[in-house]
Image: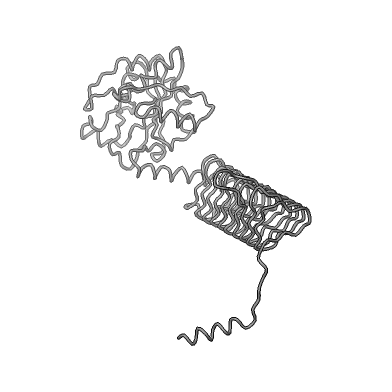
Amino acid sequence: MVGHQAEQVKASLSKLFEGAPLNFALQADQRGTGDAVNAAREALKGFQGGVVILSGDVPLLQASTLKKLVDTWRSSKATLAMVSCKPPDAKSYGRVLRDAAGKVTGIVEHKDATQEQREVREINAGIYVADSAFLWDALSKLEPKNAQGELYLTDIVPAAVKVGSVAVVEADAAEVEGVNDKVELAARAKVLQQRVNERHMLAGVTLLDPSSTFIDDAVEIGPDTVIGPFVSLGPGCEIGSKVTVGQGCVLSHTTIGDGCEVKPYSVLDEAHVGPKCVVGPFSRVRPGTHLEEGVHIGNFVETKKAHLGKGTKANHLAYLGDAEIGSGSNIGAGTITCNYDGVNKFVTTIGNGVFIGSDSQLVAPVTIGDGAFVAAGSTITEDVPKDALALSRAKQVTKEGWAEARRKVLGAKK
């Protein structure tokens, strides 16, 4: 059921549950919960059987509770079954009314309740299952005779009592808490995160500080992996076995192979990291990066659309963008693939077993052949053949005694 901001809600849910058989019904005017459910009448036309009614703002509800509710409805042959709970503070929730024999007679909303009724601790969780024939008939008879002038869904409970019986399943109060503001939203999210973290720990994952670790619900993590404090594993992540993810790392849509070490404060997005790689600390691995087995990406190294072959290393202060790099190569500190000319991006190709000296600039498009050496401090603008040495820098000039003479001049000026 959608109403306020219907198009945005439909778009979000369709993306979240892509491929699921979702149907949406619009409540054009918000005339209460009974009117909301009644708006689904056309979408369920011709359906016969049990209809489960849920509230959209109860994110902690678990499948086991819903299964228990449906099983109870079926086994008891009740007209309607509902979920209730007994929170420490009933606040403004609707109260479940029972007769002297303990049978449910109805639900009264807080605003319509007497002081005596407000003393009741059992509240309505807003979760039901009812036979479709009864449901549509009962909804058609609702009247807005209440303090808010709305069509209350809760009024179908006394209607069910008149024609049959009402079964009740009691849930833990924390499981059916709703969300009315950002404070409550954060509190419910914290519980959901705790559930996710506990699931991974029970499966053999070590979380050094579970309270500070964020793991998206769909993330997969292999056993014997260790996750440090303040790590965020966002949507689309797959983490292998015996992986270490250090403190403060942020990963999204990234695959990490078995036996890898992602050192602290590294950021990886839309990347594939093969087995036994070492990344970080303080590395930024951007979309399109593919690291083969045993690659080392060190501190303050940034990659983007870069494919690094098995065993290749770039341990310090490098930018490798739009690069194809073979196996067993070494990329020195300060190396840059100059992939952008202000208009277009170009590819740098580096072969197997290549040594790139520190502070080199490789101006794409350029190819460095297998086994070649690029001397430190070089700017390479032309292809380098296999097993060649390429250097591009001014000849060094050394003037003996110059520093001592300079110091004397400066000293005299003081």
Residue placed furthest toward the top:
46
- Quadrant location of the N terminus in the rendered image: top left
- Quadrant location of the C terminus in the rendered image: bottom left
In-front residue for pair 329/271: 329
Q: Identify which residue is drawn at 27% across, 36% down.
A: 92
Q: Which color scheme did the rendering employ for the protein?
A: one colour
Dividing the picture into quarters, in which one does residue 93 lie? top left
Q: Tell me if residue 1 comes above or below residue 210 in the rendering.
A: above
Q: Tell me if residue 211 comes above or below residue 163 in the rendering.
A: below
In-front residue for pair 349/255: 349
At which x and y percent is residue 303? 60, 50
Judge from the rendering whether residue 105 lies leftward or rightward of residue 325; answer left or right: left
At which x and y percent is residue 209? 51, 55
In-front residue for pair 339/116: 339
Residue 257 in sight from this viewpoint: no
Residue 354 in sight from this viewpoint: yes
At which x and y percent is residue 57? 38, 34
Q: Identify which residue is drawn at 50% across, 30% down.
A: 17
Dividing the picture into quarters, in which one does residue 301 lie? bottom right
In-front residue for pair 4/61: 4
Q: Identify which residue is drawn at 49% across, 86% down.
A: 411
- Count of marks placed on residues: 0
Q: Tell me if residue 248 comes above or below residue 99 in the rendering.
A: below
